[in-house]
Amino acid sequence: MRLTCLFLLLASMQSVDAQQQSPKVTLRCTGTSRLVGRPGAELEFAPLSNLGIIVSDVDQTVSFQDKILPITKITPLLVGFSSQYANGQPTISGRIDRLTKSVEIDWTYENVGENTHWELKCRPEGRFRDWG
């Protein structure tokens, strides 16, 4: 009888914990941005700080700033995302390393001289839960 009560208690605790897990993971990131389309520009780094990236299990999207991009690939090691060039907007593609939480994002413009590469180190905001 006591063993049954213990199992029921443990099962209910796990159920409550599972319900508290969010279908979204928020990463708080800092890093650098650099132009990659002009000779010599790749040596000039601009800092990026306090960038929030939201990964949504439910919507299968990655969002930051005012961008919402579909997730294109999920593996045990990475989450890939990208958008297509449209209406003068750049193609944005990136990946999130699920182990290190490092992020790389490439912005590809029609004018190659504006192409940009971001390298970010991120930490989960709040309680971390792996996604996917």
Image: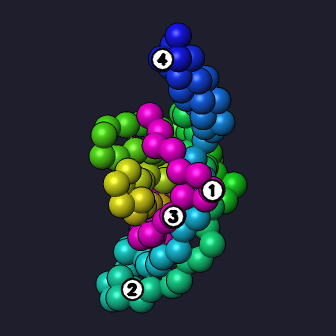
Q: Which image quadrant for residue 42?
A: bottom left
* Residue 127 showing in the rendered view: yes
Magenta highlight range: 108-132
Residue annotated with mark 4: 3
Going from N to C along the chain, the mark reached first, 4 or 2, is 4
User: Residue at horizontal 34%, vertical 54%?
Assistant: 99
Residue annotated with mark 1: 126
Q: Percent from the top left, x then y, of residue 97?
A: 36, 54
Residue annotated with mark 3: 123
Label 2 residue SS: helix
Q: Which mark is residue 41?
A: 2
Amino acid on which the number 2 mark rests in the picture = Ala
Amino acid on which the number 4 mark rests in the picture = Leu
User: Residue at horizontal 59%, vertical 24%?
Assistant: 9
Quarter of the image containing the C terminus? top left
Q: Which mark is residue 56?
A: none
